[in-house]
Amino acid sequence: MTMIRKFLLATLIILSACSPLKTYRNLPEVKAWENDIRKFEQLDVEKSYPSDAVLFAGSSSIKLWDDIGKDMQPYNVIQRGYGGAKLSDFAVYADRIIYPHPCSAIVIFIANDISGSDSDKTPAEVAELFRKTLYIIRRKYKDTPVFWIAITPTAARWHVWPEIREANQQIQKICNNHHNTYFISTEQAFLTREGLPRTELFRDDKLHLNTDGYRVWAGIIKNELYKVLGR
């Protein structure tokens, strides 16, 4: 057992040293979120949250979810979304966002690393950043259930859906191979029978969910929480 523990420790050290975060930590577009993270930290000082709450963190779909508290009942909710988040910045700030909150589960949705821009990451890069984020979470919360919500198919980013779908699939494999880590699939609920995005579930920008879209999303997410956390 001693040799096994030494091997695992050495592996973790190597993974940490090879962290992709070194590439991103000092980039201006990552540092630009510092004020948003400080606002979260101020909320942590001003407010108290129940220890059985579910922490929802990620990008604008989490931030704009106005009815998240009602939609997720009977679960208590901590909402920590900031618009435009990418895994490449979320991973840098993950400890400051997540560590202050003992909770019953952590739910993450981040959808901006592949958007059709020149700075897009490859699906493999996205998956590796998720793996690093999970590693950061597990340093403090070894057994807390972690849920990754699949990146949604949208009309606005349909031209890069094959790459997004591949990223989803790679992240799903990671989830399947890690303790208490779950992938929430949403693809079928947001596609028509013809396999195209259901535009009636999105706002005019064809990217962000509208009220009906959040209702569908909430039902899927809560059903997956039920399976793990119970009612």
Image (cartoon, helix red, strand yellow):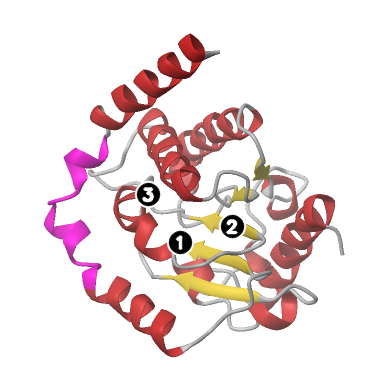
Residue 163: x and y in percent read: 45, 34
Please tell me which of labels 3 and 1 falls first in the chain. 3
State which quarter of the image contains the C terminus.
bottom right
Residue 57: x and y in percent read: 50, 63
**Of 146 and 169, the residue lying toward us:** 146
Q: Amino acid at mark 2?
A: Ile
Q: Crowding near pointer 2: few (<14 within 10 Å), some, many (20+)?
A: many
- The magenta segment is 20-34
* Magenta-drawn stretch contains 75: no
- Which is the main secondary structure of the residues drawn in magenta? helix
Q: CA distance from mark 2 to mark 3?
A: 15 Å
**Of 185 and 210, the residue lying toward us:** 185
Quarter location, residue 177:
top right
Question: Do residues under tags 2 and 1 come within 8 Å of each other at their CB atoms?
Answer: yes
Residue occupying image coordinates x 12% and y 51%: 26
Q: CA distance from mark 3 to mark 1?
A: 14 Å
Residue occupying image coordinates x 45% and y 61%: 98
Direction right: furthest residue: 231
**Is residue 95 visible to us here?**
yes
Q: CA distance from mark 2 to mark 1?
A: 8 Å
Instruction: Report the residue marked by disc 2.
Output: 106
Q: Amino acid at mark 1?
A: Ile
Q: Crowding near pointer 1: few (<14 within 10 Å), some, many (20+)?
A: some
Instruction: Report the residue marked by disc 3.
Output: 87
Would you place residue 127 above or below residue 154 in this image?
above
- Determine the secondary structure under disc 2: strand
Instruction: Report the residue marked by disc 1.
Output: 98
